[in-house]
Amino acid sequence: MAVIIPDLLPEQIANDGERAFYQAALGLPDEYVVFYSRRYYEDPEEEKIREADFVIVRRNIGFVAVEIKEGTDIRHFGGRWHTVKDGGYMPLEKDPVEQALTAMFRLRQQYQELTGGTWPGKYRFAICFPETNRIEGPLPPDLKRESIWTAEEVENLSHTLERLLGAGPGDPRRVSAASETLIERVLAPRCRIFSTLEDRIASFRKRADHSLTEEQRRILEETEEDRRKLFLGAAGTGKTFIAMEKARRCAAQGKKVLLTCFNKNLVQWMRDNITHPSVTINNFHGFLTETLIKAGVLTESEVREDEAFYEHELPDLAFQHFSVWSDAEKFDAIIVDEGQDFRDHWVTCLETALVPNGELYIFADPNQNLFGGELEKLRQRYDLSKHRLTFNLRNADTINEWLRPFAGGQATRSRLTGGVPVVRLSFRTSEEQKRLLEKEIGRLVSQGLSPQRILILSPFRLENSGLKDVTRLRDWPIVDFAAKEYGIRYATIRSFKGLEADAVFLIDLRESKACTPADVYVGASRARFILYVLHHESWQGCAGA
């Protein structure tokens, strides 16, 4: 059976004559490839497009361009073709012989332009009137009998083509090779118009380039009037962006500013984006430790890593130290990001480092309270902004929607549409999880995504995770997320809080104290564009997601 391009149901063809010829072409032998409604440029410079109704290629012989005309009564006189219409003969709008000849010569020319050689096979044309049965009188001088077809020739199309094309010229292998070139590169070239995942992410990031929303602008205006304020917003709504913008504006006014948070890994990103000498950027405990050591109140050997030291002893020492600071040593403005992670007495400690009537702004997300912060106490101490952040500016719409069950059903509105659907995969064993990771990461890389855009997030450190003792996933080494090395980045959910990545694999989700709904929410909300969720088959945490 011949190959027909495009592969249609005959019923889809409205023209009766073309439909009848298409049905007949379906019965041609295997050596034929038939093209229906093949468009081409008659003259590329003039951008004039023509169409060959059918082009029939016999692989080891050559090709035929066929022009189809409807009508049961066709005549040629006065140098023109006519058809019966409204009781009289009307000239055909286009000369079918000219149309077929033009298509034939243009296809041969296209082959020669492409290959730089001459077409080695035969090339012919035909005009077909499939609704007619008889031919009377002499034919026009530019038309041979074997090139004009009626219903009889259509019914015996294989024999009709053999009569027109005859035996193959020269070496049939050479003609067959040329025919394949004609088919694959002239008549049905295969092109691909696409974007790699890398391209799509670049486009996504461009759309996500942060400019102040009306909500954020109102919050910044509110901070010009109120000197103590608590602001709430979900993950991805731009709390950190506003905190940093406020720090810049205060510094531009000549104020001494402290911008702080809980996560020391977020600090480096902030420092990369704010370099003003009047802005001190550090995580809370790092700021206290460095300040007290510099002042000689604390020695490095006295710094401990236990909870009691960071929870109470260090803040108490700092409170006493800041209490005797002069106003010149104190800050004009203190801005706290990740406020949900702060204890009430930590904020009291910071207030002692603030000049009288100084500015204190706290940005927080109640759903990201991973470290037992005391947000409710802070809400009692400070006025809550009447302006809420309701637009998610980080996560694609698909990820934003997936986060809804973990945000108490209060999903924000995503500004970034066209995201990739979230993928959930269950596993029974760590080895099965590893195989899933290798398969899905391989799929993304094969689609053009750079491995360094991919981040694996787990509730557990690498040595305690499902990737324990695993150093590579196929061709890609596993590296710490902060390292500058090539590979798939790895981080714990809590260490990566406040940061973001283009593609996130959230793994090791199982029943555990380290895998709370808040952990899942924080981990999943780090993903900007692509999110995979790998969980143990017994885990119920994403039943609603």
Image (cartoon, rainbow, N blue to C red):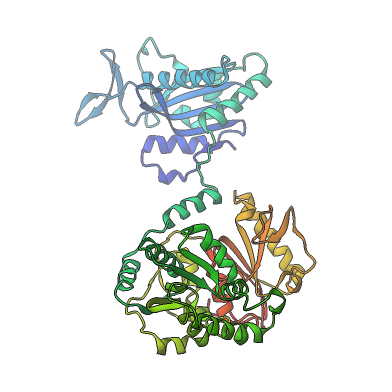
334, above or below 450, in the image = below
11, above or below 233, in the image = above
533, above or below 380, in the image = above
Task: Determine the image quadrant of residue 85.
Answer: top left
Extreme residue toward the top, this view: 141
Task: Determine the image quadrant of residue 513.
Answer: bottom right
Residue 437 visible in the snapshot:
yes
401, above or below 27, in the image = below
Return the residue nearer the eye: 332 or 422.
Answer: 332
Q: From the image, which quarter does the N terminus lie in? A: top right
Residue at screen point 53% across, 17% down: 112
Return the residue nearer the eye: 79 or 176.
Answer: 176
Return the residue nearer the eye: 388 or 259.
Answer: 259
In this picture, residue 442 sits left or right of residue 355: right
Residue 542 visible in the snapshot:
no
Residue at screen point 32% across, 77% down: 226
Tell me residue 7's x, y (percent): 50, 42
In this picture, residue 59 sits left or right of residue 89: right
